[in-house]
Amino acid sequence: MSTAVAISHPASEEWRQPSRGIVGMACLIAAESAIFIIFVVAYIFYLGKSLSGPTPREVLDLPILSTICLLSSSITVHFAVHELRAGRIGRSSSWLAATVLLGSIFIAGTAREWHELIYRHGLTIRTNLFGTTFYSLVGLHASHVIAGLIMLSIALIFSLMGKVNSSHAGRLEVLSIYWHFVDAVWVVVFTVVYVLGR
Amino acid sequence: MATHTPATSIAAHPALRQRGRALDVLYDWITTVDHKKIGLMYIGYALIFLVIAGIEALLMRVQLAVPNNTFVSPQTFNRLFTMHGTTMVFFVGMPILFGFGNYLIPLMIGARDMAFPRLNAFSFWISAFGGVLLYFSYFAGSGLYGAGTAPDVGWFAYAPLTARVFSPGHSTDYWTLSVLLSGVGSIGTALNIVATTLSMRCPGMKLSRMPLLVWLYFVTSCIAFIAISPLTAAQIMLMIDRYLGGHFFDTQAGGSAVLWMHFFWIFGHPEVYILVLPAFAFANEIIPVFSRKAIFGYPAMVAATVAIGFISMGVWAHHMFTVGLGPGANAFFTLATMVIAVPTGIKIFNWLATLWGGSIHFTTPMIFAIGFLFQFLIAGLTGVMLAASPFDWQLGNSYFVVAHFHYVLVGAILFMIFSAFYYWYPKMTGRMMSEKLGKWHFWLLVIGFHLTFDFMHIPGILGMPRRIYTYEADRGWAIWNMIVSSGAIFQTIATLIFVYNLVWSFFKGPKAGADPWDAWTLEWSTTSPPPSYNFARTPTVESRRPLWDLKHPEDPDTNYE
């Protein structure tokens, strides 16, 4: 065969495939989950193995307010997508703004906690194994929250500038899946670090 | 039913702008998001690193050819084996396989590009930057004040050797960062391959009709998410230890060196399957075409691949039998490792059944594929031997292990990569590679490969440990090392012939046409090389072999699937 051939049949049935954005985000979440699992394993493996203090029981408090804020931001971002799909841009922007606000409160809570740990309890990343594993695990999660906040803020700015319409709902949904993932990771981190690890 | 559209209708599209100046061409390649160009850049970049890492291997073989040699210093030798291993795994194996995947997957599923073209370009450039960073350590490894020095901690960089106290300077950090960047690029490409496979197929291309190559790349990419990310995590921990004073792998502060081994091999063993599954993928396409038969047992092949994917996640600690894991873990990892021989065996039997009764054409791609079958079998058998933990205690960290994994990496994977080059080169360039030079390449490589790696098992059994820079004359290893090193000469000549063939055929090779092998998958339905949009009209398929249906409308595959 030396000539090129192009083959084409009339499609007999409707041809449907999953959205590439959602598939791509699912893949990213799979890869990120593996990273988090390794850090969680390291945290659990080194529980109680520090050669010096302070210990988690001495210095850690339950971050109740932060947790409530972060978990409820999953609901607000869901409503933002829902309203955008229905074409109600103004309401969608309000829900996005609420999400950014709640996420920022969480980050502020982490900042306050770290400030207290460093300056009052003298716990830094080099103090002991607890410090090393705590700051890296919680910091890894916090950096994901910050990345999500940056992306949500960009979406909010575009929305306020009137550049967003209901055809962008699919994209905002991909972002919301990331945000749900960040929340789900916090449930694991909270359970391991603040409940079981104390 | 099929409607023929001759190639001239494709050529009727406006011709590409003439690009006379070299800068324009360069600009075009640097800014491209076309999956074919990115695929070719991956392959070209991997070939450059293949030559570099090959030269490093040659230097080591010269050093080890005779006892008490002083050709290179012990320090240089440590750097050579570290750079050879890291380069071959991260900057030859991964990019060359991702390159072929990038090039072939959209063509095989009737798509015009990958799902995320810009992410594709980002993944390539970040991986390429990682490779450059690794070699930049030769100039800047000791920082501004000292001369350059490459990483010398071995490709698996066991703790606590990587601690700041034992590895001062920045060479280890160059290793960490380059591997980290390569990991980011690999995750990006794997994500792209999965999204392309699931969301970009042409109408009628159900999952059960996809070419096996696409299936295997899909499974490989899924393994990559779970396998490469732990390495990324471990490298972040190592950076925290080295730069922020953390204690993850600091045994002085209660940290564990064994934890690094676990994290590394949770990546390290699935990595072998990330490298070997694409080689299987090439075999799945090439063996049927040159046996003139459809692949035997398509569903069994898919199932075996998925099974390998799952089992490969549970075998990592067979790299750590000598640590002393205890009887429970030893038994588990011995059994899990042996179980993986079952799906792999299914594959070998399916390939044999495809050959059986076929009208076999001994072209260059086919003889490489047959070489792969035999050599992969032997590599698998020594793998089963090493899986038995008592046997491993005897031979762990010896040249037997080195011989085993080079049998997989060279005898199986590299042979199949060469096979893929001869098979798809006509599609990529529009010209055939020289069959005569191809046969010379094959036979010299077979002789060199078996001289080197068959005989490398023996000094291992006689007790020669890996990573020693020289040995005493009275150990009885000298003759074997001389044979092993002499094989390297044949392999070098064979590789030079291959490189010459690549260049010569690009200018002087006979014109290939769209479908030189009378093959059956969609990439052969478009011109060679394909236009930037791949298909003028999106094809529709009704079976696993759309071109067979087109060429044999009286007996289409749809009757049998």
Image: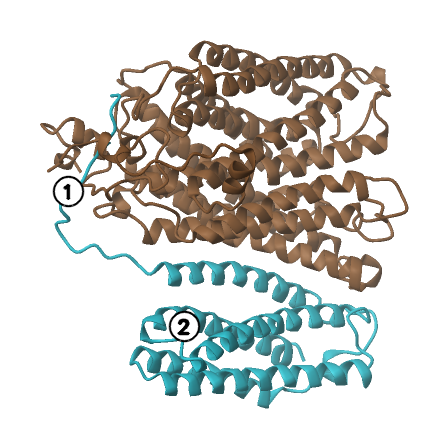
Q: Where the C terminus of chain B falls, by quadrant? A: top left
Q: Chain of mark 2?
A: A
**Colour brown, chain:** B
Q: Are marks 2 and 1 in contact (CB under 8 Å)?
A: no
Residue B253 shown left or right of residue B81 in the figure = right
Identify the chain of the residue marked 1, using the numbered disc in the image. Answer: A
Residue B140 numbered mark, or none: none
Quadrant assignment, res A173: bottom left
**Residue B204 location in percent, x, y?**
21, 46
Residue B451 image position (x, y, % from top left): 62, 14
B271 or B90, nearer to the observer: B90
Task: State the residue position of label 1.
Answer: A9
Q: Residue at x 48, y 49 (%)?
A: B120
User: Chain A takes which shade in the image?
Assistant: cyan
Along the line of sight, which residue is nearer the eye, A13 or A85? A85
**Residue A23 visible in the displayed image:** yes
Q: Is residue B396 above or below residue B446?
A: below
